[in-house]
């Protein structure tokens, strides 16, 4: 998931469908790729990470001291004191690791800035296809053969649904409801409350009609909004921060 910047919640929602009778593997793989962040969002997230994780020392100074520490620790002792040599060397090692990570992140940022959404989507599909076919489905088959704690496919899917919510409260959802409430429209607040009261709701696990009223579907044209709230974070909200004081 990290390699494709996939949405955690939606990934498990899609994975619960894999292996079920009547489900199309390729369709689900494409759905998994559709829940991966576009390159512009990945680049923005990596840029933020870069600002946070930058080394505390100038890179040139760190490299010079690191080389010195590798070649002659007595020089480090002269500069920082003999009793501090080990601590200084550990700190330098940490700074060097930060520098390597910064270089790697910088390259990833440039790659994503120059990549189109269609190109990344194809790459993500290939990554997910390889993992699904080589890792996930073989594991499901093995557990089915050995008895993975479930008697049939339906029970396995229900077990996944009980462990993986179909809805989580995200910053952008809270902000959307707050902005609507500030305009005296409390329908979105009520919808969020309904969804939070039943976050593990999957229509296929319930008798027809059960749970629909509680989650706000069919009321006031909220069906489309419910789908959006159950989906991944939109690109415009990638850097949104909604605090408890909002």
Image (cartoon, rainbow, N blue to C red):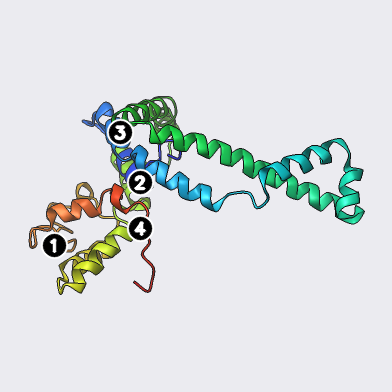
Q: Name the residue under label 3.
A: 117
Whether residue 169 is visible, yes or no, is no
x then y, percent, for residue 212:
15, 58
Closer to the chain start, of discs 1 and 4, is: 1
Q: Looking at the picture, tell me which residue is in the foreground, 8 or 184.
A: 184
Q: In this view, does 20 lie above or below 47?
A: above
Which circle marks residue 240 in the picture?
4
Q: What element carries label 2?
A: helix
Q: As drawn, is 169 to the left or to the right of 4?
A: left
Which circle marks residue 213 in the picture?
1
Task: Report crowding for label 1: few under 14, some 14 to 19, many 20 or more residues within 10 A (C-alpha).
Answer: few
Closer to the chain start, of discs 3 and 1, is: 3
Quarter containing the N terminus: top left
Q: In which quarter of the image is residue 13?
A: top left
Q: Distance between the residues labelled 1 and 4?
A: 30 Å
Q: Looking at the picture, tell me which residue is in the foreground, 27 or 214.
A: 27
Is there CB contact under 8 Å for labels 4 and 2? no
Closer to the chain start, of discs 1 and 2, is: 2
Q: Looking at the picture, tell me which residue is in the foreground, 168 or 49.
A: 49
Is there CB contact under 8 Å for labels 2 and 3? no
Closer to the chain start, of discs 4 and 3, is: 3
Q: What element carries label 3?
A: helix
Q: Name the residue under label 2.
A: 160
Give me the residue at 23% from left, 31% from top.
23
Q: In this view, does 159 lie above or below 17?
A: below
Q: Distance between the residues labelled 4 and 2?
A: 30 Å
**Closer to viewer: mark 1 or mark 4:** 4
Q: Distance between the residues labelled 2 and 3?
A: 30 Å
Quarter containing the C terminus: bottom left
């Amino acid at each position: 998931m990290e390699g494709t910047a996939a949405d955690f919640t939606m990934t498990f929602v899609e994975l619960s469908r894999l292996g079920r009778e009547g489900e199309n593997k390729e369709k689900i793989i494409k759905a998994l790729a559709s829940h991966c962040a576009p390159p512009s969002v990945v680049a923005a997230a990596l840029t933020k990470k870069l600002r946070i994780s930058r080394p505390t020392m100038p890179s040139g100074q760190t490299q010079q001291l690191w080389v010195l520490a590798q070649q002659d620790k007595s020089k480090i002792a002269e500069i920082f004191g003999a009793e501090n040599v080990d601590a200084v060397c550990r700190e330098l090692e940490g700074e060097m690791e930060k520098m390597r990570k910064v270089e790697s992140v910088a390259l990833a940022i440039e790659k994503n800035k120059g990549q189109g959404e269609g190109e990344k989507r194809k790459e993500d599909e290939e990554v997910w296809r390889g993992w699904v076919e080589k890792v996930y489905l073989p594991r499901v088959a093995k557990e089915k053969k050995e008895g993975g704690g479930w008697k049939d496919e339906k029970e396995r899917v229900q077990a996944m649904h009980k462990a993986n919510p179909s809805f989580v409260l995200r910053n952008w959802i809270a902000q959307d409801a707050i902005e609507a409430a500030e305009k005296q429209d409390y329908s979105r607040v009520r919808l969020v409350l309904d969804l939070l009261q039943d976050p593990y709701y999957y229509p296929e696990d319930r008798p027809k009609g059960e749970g629909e009223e509680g989650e706000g579907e069919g009321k006031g044209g909220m069906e489309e909004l419910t789908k959006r709230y159950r989906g991944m974070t939109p690109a415009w909200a990638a850097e949104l921060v909604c605090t408890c004081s909002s």
